[in-house]
Image (spheres, helix red, strand yellow):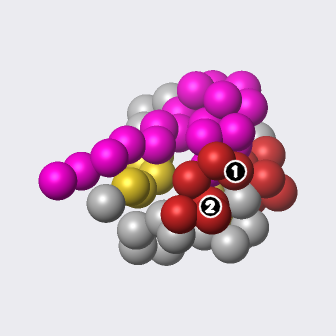
Amino acid sequence: MTTIDLDWTRCDAHGLCSRLLPEKITLDEWGFPILDGRELDPELVRPARAAALACPALALRVSRKA
């Protein structure tokens, strides 16, 4: 199972993640991301990694869980 996780202590609400991965991330009224919490579909793993790498605050992480 591959997921995308958010480190809330690092997030600065830039909103770039929601533009790069709108299938999994939306923004709340203050611009902070809301993750859907479900497993990433295989075709979204690569875009999720790209979104994590593009995050200016390095607040996103893509991880595999058993």
Residue 17: percent from left, percent from top: 71, 49
Q: Which residue is mark 2?
A: 44
Local packing at callout 2 (Cα closer than 10 Å; few below 14, some 14-19, many 20+) is some
Residue at mark 1 to residue at mark 2: CA–CA distance: 5 Å
Asked if the residues shown at circle 1 and circle 2 are in contact, with their CB atoms under 8 angstroms apart, the answer is: yes
Bounds of the magenta span?
48-66
Q: Is residue 7 left or right of residue 16?
A: left
Q: Residue at x 47, y 38 (%)?
A: 61
13 left or right of 35?
A: right
Q: Residue at x 79, y 53 (%)?
A: 20
Q: Provide residue 24's location: percent of width, then percent of height.
A: 60, 68
Residue 21 to residue 46: above or below: below
Residue 11 point in image, percent of width and height: 57, 37
> Does residue 24 sit above or below 46 in this rendering?
below
The numbered disc on residue 47 is 1
Q: Is residue 59 above or below residue 34?
A: above
Q: What residue is rendered at 69% in x and 43% in y?
A: 51
Instruction: Looking at this view, name the residue that lies furthest to the left.
Output: 66
Numbered label tally? 2
Regarding mark 2 in the picture, which secondary structure is present there?
A: helix
Amino acid type for the residue under numbered disc 2 = Leu
